[in-house]
Image (spheres, rainbow, N blue to C red):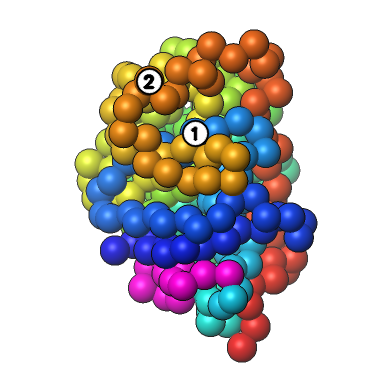
Amino acid sequence: MLVDYNKVNIFQDEKQVLRNVDFQVSEGEFIYIIGKVGSGKSSLLKTIYCELDIYAEDAEKANVLEQSLLTLKRSHVPALRKQMGIIFQDFQLLHDRNVFKNLEFVMRATGWKDTQAINQRINDVLGEVGMLDKKEKMPSELSGGEQQRIAIARALLNRPKIIIADEPTGNLDPETATNIVSILKRASKDGAAVIMSTHNIHLLEQFPGKVFRCKDGEFKLVTDNSETKDLEESNEPIETMIEPLDFVDDEETTPNEE
């Protein structure tokens, strides 16, 4: 089991956003998390990659990649994150260097030392997302869809067991969004578990997967697709349903200390 949560209470800024979360994720699963802004989608994802704490009194079990988040030391968080790929809606590429240097930076920061191996792996992941011919381009020279492909390539570098995608298609046109999700779907077929938050109901129909919903502090498996319809029929402007994303900074992250 890659993620195993049992009766987990999740807090954001000292406010409880989800209660009694039961959530299990296995290898190769493709999972959607749906819900409106403020419903807890991003908060749940942040607990998985240790940007939000889960304390012992707030859960019966909270395991990720066989590590208990209830007792995880801060010093062990980078090793845990190395086994994950995290994709953000706003790409979070480094704009002072080209695509190749963006990916090289991540690899060296996560322990890769052999230059030949680094070059080969970068070429491999760029090929997987159809961006090998863009490796010398600066991020500012790429379209939004191309930047998101690079962000996915970055997430694939360390052959992650879990890929977390927080609204990865929120700022993209429908055709580009479809292409992005097809890449993630392929990654799940290769064995990675993909956990993706979205408000795009059409993607759920086009790329079927297991669907969970955050609503009124509850997190549950949606077993009847009709339960998603109120998102589609809501009069709320779609832009207001997109949650802001925070940059993941190891120095600012405060997982549970020893």
Q: Callout 2: few (<14), some (14-19), or many (20+) C-alpha neighbours within 10 Å? A: few
The vertical placement of 238 against 82, above or below, is: above
The vertical placement of 68 against 21, above or below, is: below
Name the foreground residue: 100 vs 48. 48
The vertical placement of 91 against 253, above or below, is: above
Locate residue 131, reporting x and y percent: 43, 31
Name the foreground residue: 233 vs 118. 233
Whether residue 135 is visible: no
Residue 209, by quadrant, is: top left
Locate residue 25, reporting x and y percent: 33, 54
Residue positioned 61% across, 23% down in the render: 171
Q: In the image, which residues are magenta?
A: 58-68
Residue positioned 37% across, 63% down in the render: 4
- The residue at the far bottom in this view is 258
Residue positioned 64% across, 11% down in the render: 235
Locate residue 116, reporting x and y percent: 38, 60
Residue 167, by quadrant, is: top right
Residue that badge 1 annotates: 34
Name the foreground residue: 107 vs 37. 37
Disc number for residue 88? none
CA distance for labels 2 and 1: 13 Å
Type of amino acid under label 1:
Ile
Residue that badge 2 annotates: 226
Secondary structure of the residue carrying numbered label 2: helix
Q: Could you tell whether 93 is left or right of 21 in the image?
A: right
Magenta highlight on residue 163 = no
Type of amino acid under label 2:
Ser
Q: Callout 1: few (<14), some (14-19), or many (20+) C-alpha neighbours within 10 Å? A: many
Q: Earlier in the sequence, mark 2 or mark 1?
A: 1
Residue positioned 65% across, 83% down in the render: 257
